[in-house]
Each structure stands twice: as structure tokens, then as C-alpha cells.
Amino acid sequence: MLIIRLSSLIILVLLSGCASSPIESVVSQESDIQDKPVETKVKVPPKEVKTAIAPEVLYMLLAAELAGQRGQYEVALEGYMEAAKRVDDPRFAERAASIAMYMKNSGKTDEALSIWLSQDPKGVMPRKLAALSALRSGEKSLAVEHINALIKADPVDFEDTLLELVGVLQKEDKAAFVFDVLETVSKTNADIPVTYFVQSLLAMQINKKDVAEQKVQKALALRPNWDSALILQAQIALAANDVGRAKQILLDATKLLPDSEKIKKMFGQLLVKNGEYSQAVDVYQALITKNPKDTDSQFNLALLNLQLGLDKKAEDLLTGLLGQAGWRERATLYLGRIEESRGNSKKALGWFDKVVEGPYAFESAMSGVSLLAKDKQFNDASSRLDSLTKKYPNQKLRITLIRASIYNQQGQFTKAFDLLTQGLVEQPDQKDLLYTRAIMAGRLGKLELLKVDLKKILLKNPDDFEALNALGYSLLDDPKSYDEAEIYLNKALKLRPAEAIIIDSYGWLQFKLGRLDQALSYLEQAYEKQPEGEIAAHLCEVLWVLGRQEEAKAIFSKAVKDNPADEYLLGFQKRVLNGPK
């Protein structure tokens, strides 16, 4: 609850003209603007403040303080508003504006800001808040007027000011309107790069990638060595699935700005996204060599080493992070995962159970549950889930999904299906629930429902590669649906050309269509990337049909040794290896 404090020295404070405030800033509860005092670069002559306050105004202020303390914010607002009108002191208008903004009273906010600006016409803070209010209320001409005034009043800090304003509005669905306001501002202030940069960000929010690219190019034309704009340009290329261009932008940027850690880290992230792990290792290692205290790069390098199977190197880096504030819990979680990968379940569980608070506590607890389920300790896993349900009520979705996964591992497909169906009653469009229920529907032979759930996902998320892949693959059971399956799998492959399971699905489609050489090529790629049971079974079947039975047997023997209970491998064995001679 907001507390407006009553000061026993209120009369002395008001009469002395002291800068300390009887009311704490309240607008800070919804934005950072009020918390960050801005020192205007425009020198304003000191203003004589009237301190001879009439007794009725003092009474009014005391009443406002008492009302605020009691949560009667409307009364407090009226008191400060009336004081602002009667006394030429901008601090009273500031308090009135703060309370009005907290109350989301746009009319009173504008009135208080108008008084504040009339008493402090060159003040940056009232102008910023006035611009924010106009942007929120959709008053374009007023927003343009205030932003133009901010450019004149404080040109040096305008970049920070504009980014701050847009940051406050980020979750308020104002992207298109703010873009339009800045379009007008840029017509009279064409030489300010941050305007185009922010427009590019806003264009990305409203999914106008071409416009975003045009605007970021304008920003870079004015400021070619701006690292943030170069990174944004690379992100726009990535959003358009043009990985090659994004990579080239960042390569050129590293030459232009060889000392920029931000660009190198973005380049490292891109390499990871593109599966170029060894190159990414070189990038992060160079960052650490230059700055041994770069814990962010140390952690990323540890994860890369895990991806490359270099557990000891990852372990050394993570152990070093245990003593670093802000990294202990993350390092502990991943040290547990290393022990899990080594088959040391007891040690792994010990690591997971050490994280009992903070942002990684739930993730560690879930890792413990998954480990117990993997070791077929289903009762213990279920018991832990019951405790987590009470402790983390906001994590109901995650808990439902892992509980369904545990039912699936036990072969209790109907229980999993019913649990997910119950979850969809509360969240009928939840993507993960729909996807997982579709998988369970497939297990139960409810193929029509499987298609319905996956198509429902694609209706709102047409580029969901997992749903595209699952739907396309599921259609391969019916020769009449091969053409439709090809449409979905083609799109999935374009979206994720390096994803092993999608390459596998596409290869299996080629096999179904009788294109054996193409099928072999795709399935070999998939198996090289991810030598798991289902992919191995598909590859073995294609090799068998091609007459390369010995190769098929060799791959099968290795795969079944690693995954002795894999249903796809056992299915291949039953149908092909042990089938009719």
C-alpha cells in the first residue's frame, strides 16, 4: 500500500523553502522517470519562491498529508492542486502531478503538469512527464510539442530521455502511435539518430521488419559507429531468418568497433543460435582473456562446453562462479546437471536441493523432479510436485506439464491426456498444453484431435516450427495426406534448417514418397546431429530398403545398446530384423 508520510515539521519545511518532500514520490510505482533527477543543461536563473503562505493554505497542506497517510488520495490530490494554484512554488504542482499519475487520473495529471510547467517552463522533469501523459492519452499534437521542447531544453540527454519514455510505455500497446508521433518529430529534427533508432524498435514491435530496417539504416547513416544500432540491425536480419546477413553485419561491426564487448557478445549469441559452437567458444574465450572478471562470458562459455561434451572445462568454470554474487545459484544448478549427465543421481540431487531460494529455486526443484522421474522414482517425484504446487501456485502450468510427462513415462497416457484436458479448460489457447495434449492424443489413437490441437496452435502461431513438424510428421501415416504433410514440413525446415528432428521428419517424408537417395541424405544428416533412437530407426530402415543391411545392423546395434527400451528401435527390430525372411 502506498504511504504518504506526515511530517511533524511540515510548517517549518514549507516556510523555509527546503527541498525535502513531505510526500514521497508516487509516480515511481509505475515508471522510473520520477526516481531519476535530470540535471538540465540549460541554466535557469534562480527563481524567487513565495514563502509567505497563507494560513488556509498551510491547513490545506496538512489536511492533504493526513489524507494521504490514510489512503484518501483524492483528498490529498485536491489539497496539493489547490496549493499549487495559490503558491508560486513548482514543488506543490510536482506533488499533485505525482499523486494524479499514481491514481491514473489523466485529467488531473494534465492540469497539475500545466501548472508545473507554467511555474518552471524550462524544467526537464515536468516536460518529460507531460510528454509521457500525452503519449499515454493519444494526444499527438501535444506529444509532438513536448518532445520537441525536450530536444531544445536538453539536447545532450535527449537520447536517454526518449529511450526512458518508450521504456515506460513498452507494455501499453502504444508502439504504432509513438512511431507516428516520432515520424512527425523527425520532420523538423531530421539529424537526431535516436529518433530513427526508437522508430526501428517500435516497427519491430508491430511486426514491420522492412520499416524497421529502413529506420535503423537512417540512424546508422547519422551515427555509423553506434553499437546498439548495429546490434539492432543484426537482430532485424535474424527476425527475417537471414542468418548470413546478421552474421556479416556483426563481423563488419567487430572490425569497426574492435573494443565493443556488446557486439562481440551478440556475435557469440548468434554463433550459438546457428550451432557454430566451436567458433562461439573462441569468441567468449577472447572476451574472458581481455576481461577475466567477465562472469557473464564465463557462464556462457561453461554452457558451450557442456554443449560440446567438455564437462570438465564446464565444471571448472562453474565452480569458479560459486563464489560470485548473483551466479552461485545458476552455477549450482548446472553443476547438478553435469553430475546428472555422468549418471551420479545422488550427487546431482544434492546440488539441485542446495538452491532453496531466489530465481533459480523453482528450476532446480523441477530438475530434481525430472531426475527422480528419469530414475523411475515416480512416487518421490510426484510427492515433490505436490509440495511445489503449494509453494509455487503461479507455476501451475509448468507443474502440469511435467506431471503429464511423468504419466507419459509410466505409460499412463489417459491420465496425462485427462490432466492436460483439464488444464485447457482454464487456458484453452495455451500453446504448450495444446502441443502436449496433441502428443498424448497421438499415443491414444485420437488422430483427429491431434490435428485439431496442432492446427489451433498454428492458427495463432503460424511459424511454430514444433507444431509444423509434429503435424507434418503425424500426417505421414496416411498416403493421402503426403502432399499436406510436405507443406508443413517444408515450412518447418525453412524455419529451422539445422534442427535434427525436423531434418529427420523431412527425410522420412522423402522415404514415404519413394525418394530413397534424398531420404538417406537427410536422415544421415539428422543422425549425425542427434543419434537418438527414432532417427536411428528411420535411417536403418532406409539403409535396409537400399540393400545395405550390414550398415543398418551396425547402426541398430549401437543405437539399441544406448537406448535398449526405445520403442522405435524395438519396432524396427520386430518389423524388419525379426520379420518375415
Image: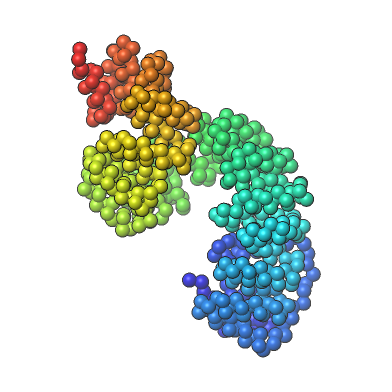
Q: Is residue 203 above or below residue 443?
A: below
Left/right placement of residue 533 relative to residue 201 reads: left
Count of numbered circles on the image: 0
Q: Determine the residue positioned at 68% across, 66% down.
A: 126
Which quarter of the picture shows residue 562?
Answer: top left
Residue 544 percent coordinates (x, y): 30, 14
Residue 298 percent coordinates (x, y): 48, 41
Residue 258 percent coordinates (x, y): 64, 36
Residue 63 percent coordinates (x, y): 58, 84
Q: Is residue 568 above or below residue 122?
A: above
Residue 343 visible (yes or no)? no
Outermost residue on the front side: it is: 480
Nearer the observer, 214 or 319: 214
Which quarter of the picture shows residue 289?
Answer: top right
Outermost residue on the bottom side: it is: 55
Q: Determine the residue positioned at 50% across, 44% down.
A: 296
Q: Is residue 551 above or below residue 352?
A: above
